[in-house]
Image (cartoon, coloured by chain):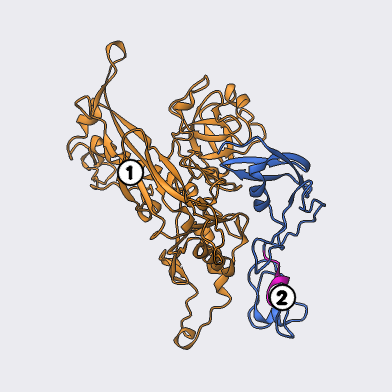
Chain colours: A blue, B orange
Amino acid sequence: MALSGQFVTIVNRTQRELKAKFDGKEFVIPVGESPLPLEVVPFAKRQNPVMGTMHAKNPMKVQSLIGVKGTKDPITPVKEDPTAELFDPDTLDPLPPGQKRVRIKGREVTRWELADDNPVVDNQAAVGGD
Amino acid sequence: MGDTAILDGILKDVFEDFVSSQVNDKNPLVDLFKPETIPHGGREVKYATKVGRNASPMFVGEDSAFATAGAPAYVQFSITTRKAMGRIRLTAEVIDDTSRGEYAYKQALKEEMKDLIDNFAKRQEFALATDGRGILALIDEADPDGDQTLELDAPGGVTNDNFGNRYCQPGMVIAAINPATGQPRAVTCTITACNEDGTDVTVNTAGGAWATAWANSDYIVQAAADATGTPSVNDTSWEKAWWGLLALVDDGTYRDDYFGVSRTQYPNLKSYVRATTGALSLDGMQLVSDVVEQKLGGRIDLVVAHHSTRRTYLQLLEADRRYQGGDLQSPDGGTKAFKQQDVTFGGVPFRAIKSFPLDIVMFLDKGNSGFVQYVSEAGKWEDRDGAVLVRDGTGSSARHAFEGWYYMRKQFHARYPGYNARMDGVTGQTLVVVRDE
């Protein structure tokens, strides 16, 4: 589709350059305010989510690292969470008493580590309760 | 006294009648993706697709007015075929001197012709995994500095810092396309080597015009020949490849204009795409299936990803595995994936494809999507002038050699792209991409 020529002012809420892809073309979004074609905005917002903010029950509810100036979009600076997960665990169903969710790096964890009140998950899960 | 050194003159070299191939000629995406074939001719194929409903039905009271007439909305797709061509060239001597088994391991003419057709299958594998723009990679150097090493990333045009050269092949002539204009930069060059870690290719020229003209993030595409000037865009592969799954199963990220119809204007033509998935999760995969079902009643019957990404799925399941009974004596830490068989998710095969984009998982409803290929020519040696092999040149440029041209004309299409879905930006993989030469 040929772009309509309409531009909006968007705000990159981070301190790094972001990118957005639309119709095979990559658009670079510098830090701060910049113009972006209107058609590209939803793609830019979707491709640059704030990790850890997607509602577990409604994937349409997720914050973006990009906001459109003059709309309801938040445009205040945001501190990025290096977590790899998009879901916001606080929006998952509440756990039974005594259980808690632990955000971990890496992927290997034993149930003994998770059973600890202060688990030290070091990505080298030891079998046997260490 | 005689030994093998003294009597070497009477020893024979014994040649085993065998040629081992060290190139990977398996093309799993081509084998997996077997669309219905429809003949194509004329200017283009058009067909209508319904994209809207008559909105007038409403609940009314006695003697009340009711809504003015609505109408369903239709638009038309426009599909034209695209062409791939390749050629062989052999001298008369190599044809004659390999014509019999006692002269050579293989007949050069027969092998060259067969090999070219195998290589077309490899190009089709690349095309099916990408979006039809013919992009091999993007330049990943702030300023190509005139040495013979060209750093690459984003293989196939898919954003990724790794294995930029995975679709490149020594011998390819390459051009750089300016992303802003879609026009080639000055000068082309030939790839002489691809490094094993996937980060760069070596080219045949250093310095000169190409180093000053080419720029970071330019698209690298195949070109017809080495050129010192600016090649014609028509002599490159830019926007000439067959549309692959990235174009067909898409929401506008790669192809907004879907065969003449805007996906932005008609969202019915979008596949559901999770743009920045992050870590893969079982719930996220179920969510994708739920969206497809709500959109058009789709049923996912195949999940496809690169091997590295499929391993992240297997890792999700590792912590829950339990050994019991007989397994305790001989626990098996592997899965069917070790034999390169399909693992499953909800009973649906999850297949690893080596040419697939690195951080993308695709969810396909092959039964309902209407994957087709419009074919003008399925593949033939050009022989309209009466012969497959034609003499090379005439007059003073003549050479005692022969050329053969092979070509295909087709285009892939999905009639119902909304039945499929895609997850982009999957992270957490240990990326291992093995080049196949």
Residue A101's label in the rendered image is 2
User: Which quadrant of the view contains residue A6?
Assistant: top right
Residue extent of the magenta highlight: A87-93
Determine if residue B437 is in view. no
Whole-percent x, y for residue A31 in the image = 77, 43
User: Which quadrant of the view contains residue B396?
Assistant: top left
Chain assignment, label 1: B
Determine if residue B108 is in view. yes
Judge left or right: residue A99 versus residue B279. right
| Residue type (three-letter) at the residue carrying disc 2 | Arg
Residue B188's label in the rendered image is none
Residue under label 1: B118
Q: Residue at x 61, y 59 (%)?
A: B277
The single residue placed furthest to the front in the displayed view is B63
User: Which quadrant of the view contains residue B234?
Assistant: top left
| Residue type (three-letter) at the residue carrying disc 1 | Asp
**In this view of the protein, which residue sits in the foreground, B296 or A110?**
B296
Q: Residue at x 67, y 35 (%)?
A: B142
Is B119 magenta? The answer is no
Report the quarter where the N terminus of chain A lies.
Answer: top right
Q: Secondary structure at mark 1?
A: helix
Whole-percent x, y for residue B225 in the image = 44, 26
Between the residue at mark 1 and the residue at mark 2, the CA separation in whole angstroms equals 52 Å
The single residue placed furthest to the top in the displayed view is B396
Report the quarter where the C terminus of chain A lies.
Answer: bottom right
Instruction: Please tell me whether mark 1 or mark 2 is closer to you in this view.
Output: 2
Q: Secondary structure at mark 2?
A: loop
Is A89 magenta? The answer is yes
Chain assignment, label 2: A
Judge left or right: residue B346 versus residue B403. right
Whole-percent x, y for residue B217 in the image = 62, 37
**In this view of the protein, which residue sits in the foreground, B208 or B386?**
B386
